[in-house]
């Protein structure tokens, strides 16, 4: 039975959240072929400085060359596939593979091979590092492993003005990244991020602290944003109430129209960007398997934060840690429920329009995801190819 179409859109069928073959198609289409956040430009101030990241099982790194230019590469040696760099740091003049010592210049070209007499026909020009697309968006660095398409700036369009207003280009990382593995399909976590319908029940603390307003938008690229305002009524929770009382200490960081507001972006899919007057975070879904997703969060802010702003950040993190724990439980319940015999999705509410749009994007990119039930084992990719062909 095909899920009933409502004005908001047709929800994806349960099998699409459980199928390993579809997951492989999604990994290539929605993660390797789309922009992925890797860090901030201020992590790469010096020649030879680098940062690494994983896009699922694909490793990447960004490196500043001797010419001061930033470049992004796949984190794999051209000889025998060893990962080359780990974490972040500085390469002293060259990039050297720790396995056999193949050595690359900071622009990615192959410079030297140990015992090169054993490679009599080696053409070094053909064995440089694999360079991938890199974009600096207001100091936020994004890479795309394969394919082409609109730039990050084009995807955000006029909403890029928010990042300029907050001065994101001058931010620095203010604490270690947070990483958690949830036993859910990445789309379950993303559906949850895209809607606020669950907030009053699922996040009572957030509901006490904030109220939605009518400032929201869905761009043609699929990027969305919305804003929340701090409630004037003091919360009966001590941490939330302290946050309300301290919020004014960051008013000078933003224009008047953004004071006392949280701005939330969805980008990707798979990225949530939250802008607060005192800091920002980038929430990122990294697919591991059809029912396993890594949630990586990066925290950025002004380097000259006052003691009052540091306290405000501490309160913010305490509030959002609770929200995150609640979301993990909510998403786990959904993942379990999707396996229930004969379950079919119900209608989407008017507060879930972003989910409807996202599910339409999935079906457009992978037509097989529009089927009411899963194709026979081993045939998902071939069925998707068939449906992709013009009739």
Image (cartoon, rainbow, N blue to C red):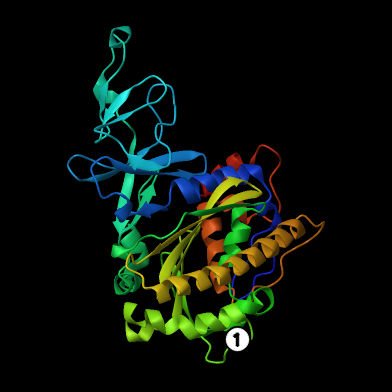
* Relative horizontal placement of residue 175, taking residue 3 as reference (left or right): left
Camera-side residue of 90 and 38: 90
Residue 163 horizontal/vertical position (percent): 33, 69
Q: Quadrant of the N terminus?
A: bottom right
User: In the picture provided, is 41 more to the left or to the right than 314?
Assistant: left
Which residue is rendered at x = 71% and y = 41% of the image? 376
Residue 36 relative to residue 124: left or right: right
Residue found at x 63% / y 78% = 205
Location of residue 146 (image quadrant): top left
Residue 328's x, y, as percent? 65, 61
Asked if residue 32 is positioned above or below residue 17 in the image, the reply reads above
The residue that appears at 69% across and 50% down in the rendered structure is: 18
Secondary element type, mark 1 = loop
* Image coordinates for residue 277, horizontal then vertical, percent: 40, 76
Q: Residue at the far right: name it.
A: 341
Residue labelled with disc 1 = 235
């Amino acid at each position: 039975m095909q899920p009933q179409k409502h004005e908001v859109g047709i929800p994806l069928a349960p099998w699409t959240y459980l199928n390993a073959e579809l997951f492989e198609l999604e990994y290539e289409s929605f993660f390797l072929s789309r922009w992925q956040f890797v860090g901030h430009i201020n992590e790469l101030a010096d020649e030879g400085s680098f940062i690494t990241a994983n896009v699922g099982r694909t490793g990447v790194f960004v490196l500043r060359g001797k010419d001061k230019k930033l470049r992004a590469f796949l984190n794999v040696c051209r000889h025998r596939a060893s990962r080359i760099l780990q974490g972040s740091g500085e390469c002293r003049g060259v990039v050297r593979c720790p396995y056999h010592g193949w050595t690359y210049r900071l622009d990615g070209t192959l410079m030297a091979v140990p015992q090169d007499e054993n490679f009599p026909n080696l053409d070094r020009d053909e064995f440089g590092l694999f360079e991938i697309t890199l974009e600096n968006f207001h100091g936020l660095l994004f890479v795309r492993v394969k394919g082409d398409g609109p730039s990050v700036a084009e995807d955000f369009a006029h909403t890029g003005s928010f990042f300029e207003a907050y001065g994101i280009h001058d931010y620095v990382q203010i604490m270690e990244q947070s990483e958690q593995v949830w036993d859910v399909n990445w789309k379950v976590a993303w559906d949850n991020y895209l809607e606020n319908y669950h907030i009053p029940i699922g996040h009572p603390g957030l509901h006490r602290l904030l109220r939605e307003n009518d400032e929201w938008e869905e761009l043609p690229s699929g990027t969305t944003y919305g804003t929340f305002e701090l409630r004037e009524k003091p919360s009966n929770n001590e941490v939330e109430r302290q946050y309300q009382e301290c919020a004014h200490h960051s008013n000078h960081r933003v224009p008047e129209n953004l004071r006392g507001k949280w701005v939330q972006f969805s980008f990707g899919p798979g990225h949530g960007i939250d802008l607060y007057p005192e800091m920002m975070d980038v929430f990122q879904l990294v697919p591991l398997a059809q029912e396993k997703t890594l949630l990586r969060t990066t925290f950025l802010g002004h380097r000259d934060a006052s003691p009052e702003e540091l306290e405000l950040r501490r309160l913010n993190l305490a509030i959002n840690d609770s929200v995150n724990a609640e979301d993990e439980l909510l998403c786990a319940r959904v993942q379990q429920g999707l396996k229930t015999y004969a379950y079919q999705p119900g209608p989407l509410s008017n507060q879930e329009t972003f989910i409807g749009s996202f599910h339409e994007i999935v079906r457009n990119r992978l037509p097989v995801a529009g089927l009411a039930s899963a194709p026979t084992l081993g045939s998902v990719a071939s069925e998707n190819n068939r449906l992709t062909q013009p009739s």
